[in-house]
Amino acid sequence: MSTSPAQPTDKAGLRRLASYAMLIVYLLFLILPIYWLVNMSFKPNVEILNQLTLIPQNPTLGNYANILTDPTWYMGYVHSLTYVILNTVISVTVALPAAYAFSRYSFIGDKHLFFWLLTNRMAPPAVFVLPFFQLYSSIGLFDTHLAVALAHCLFNVPLAVWILEGFMRGVPKEIDETAYIDGYSWFRFFTRIFMPLISSGIGVAAFFCFMFSWVDLLISRTLTSTEVKTIGVAMTRTSSATGLDYGTLAAAGVLTIIPGALVIWFVRNYIAKGFALGRV
Amino acid sequence: MDKPQNNRAWFMVLPVLLLVAFSAIIPLMTVVNYAFNDTFGNNAFFWVGVEWFKETLESDRMWGALQRQLIFSFTILAIEVPLGIAVALAMPKKGVWASVCLVLFALPLLIPWNVVGTIWQVFARIDIGLLGYSLGLIGIDFNLGQNASAAWVSVIMMDVWHWTSLVVLLAYAGLQSIPDAYYQAAKIDQASRWAVFRYVELPKLKGVLLIAVLLRFMDSFMIYTEPFVVTGGGPGSATTFLSIDLVKMALGQFDLGPAAAFSIMYFLVILLVSWAFYTIMVNLDREEERSE
């Protein structure tokens, strides 16, 4: 800072102004495309195609009504939610004891195993598309919710293990030892004492498993065909095949954003931690 | 770290091991099998050795996709990292506004990837999209179906829109962990804003920024859904990145051998970067322990 007393405040003020300007521009950049989608979802198709209006001139809920009355649309959400929830439950359940083992004990090959898990989180799904298709066809799981749920374990189980391990290492070891001295069995200690202690970690892990399973299109599209039509598949088909029903497409998009938008407030302080695999 | 040696801990890891083995190792073995064999169907395989690798390495198609992929990944890194740091520095440090910023920034991160594609496809269209239409008004032809540079600009803008917030959130988390005493010391020394950033904030941000760079590199390196929805890899093959090309090869044309060879080389790159990520993580943990 400069030596004269007046200048620093001027400079600081200017700097704050620049900061706010930058924040506002960035926020506008983030919001505009979403606003456009929401805007479109309330317009009839005639208005979308014929004039460019910043707010709907004839606001309509027709697009949402389309989705809620057409089974191929609303069942898309049901199918997607089914495999997403199934995957979240499986991932977190198997990851809990494993993360505990990694955070508390050292055992033969632990570091290699931990690294190997990471490589699965980083693996490109495109590599797995064809083998998954063949594997799940050969065991008769193709086109079921379970197939997609198991396939998503590829990246969600490692993610859950890493996140949970990050939270568990923050819990002092003395707690485990005291519980054992008090005569708790491992299972009782783990479910009654330890899990409540890391409940926020479990919530964050579940949230991220949910999210990464929810946002995937490639694997769910490959492993399903007629029985299980996911919402992502329904959306890509409308956009490419007919290319006409933009209103409904926009409404469907808005509805997929809602689950994330609902819980985002509760996990706001953990988003960075979750994306960084529990390491921040 | 002083963790007790206990090999029975393996039993706790076993379910994870079995599950991930089922969803990772078995499929990968199939890929390896295809990479070294040729087949005429009916499960009759012929050993062809490294033939597929040679073919893939000699084809312009793979190099083209790799080149586009690298240009894409480095471009988005060059934009997202500085922009992310700048936004994180401009954010309020605490209070309600900090929370509001966090929530709004995180919104794009939680949108399904195909919807991200849809959002940008309708946003960038010249007839019904705000962006494409506005650019058209000032005389720029932004037809991303035919114009390769328009397609590139949309795909890059989309990724910046989608993922810059991740860098922001990580950098913000890093900034939060700097004790106030550091800033006070800098103030006493009458350090300039730039000096504070260069000598106080940046060293403390080093760890989270490395994580951010690696995560962004990995995730952009395997990007599929978003460009697929926006441009379909086109016009021509202008925005066909590695994953898009691979899926085209494997599911579209059923060229199993080349696709498998391609997959294995793709995977090796991923292994290398993951290893870098892991090493950095371990070092960071160690540093943290030392400072505690």
Image (tube, rainbow, N blue to C red):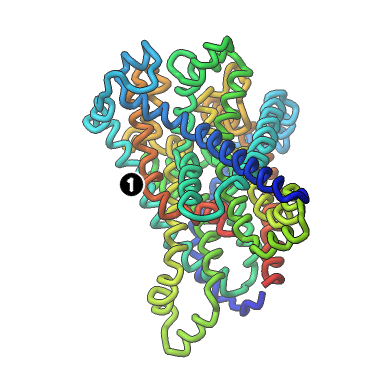
Q: Nearer the viewer, residue A271 or B192?
A: B192
Q: Where is residue B192 in the image (x, y as percent from the top left)?
A: 75, 50
Residue tagged by mark 1? A82
Q: In which quarter of the image is the C terminus of chain A?
A: bottom right
Q: Position of residue B55 (x, y in %)?
A: 72, 29
Q: Is residue A183 above or below residue A259?
A: below
Q: Which chain is mark 1 on?
A: A
Q: Nearer the viewer, residue A255 or A105?
A: A255
Apparent side of residue B225 relative to residue A252 in the rendered image (left or right): right
Judge whether residue A40 can be spotted in this image.
yes
What residue lies at 25% left-to-right and 24% top-to-bottom? A60
Q: Nearer the viewer, residue B101 or B230?
A: B101
Specify the amino acid type for callout 1: Thr
Query: Number of marks in the image?
Result: 1
What residue lies at 47% left-to-right and 34% top-to-bottom? A31
Q: Position of residue A139 (x, y in %)?
A: 41, 46
Q: Is residue A134 above or below residue A33?
A: below
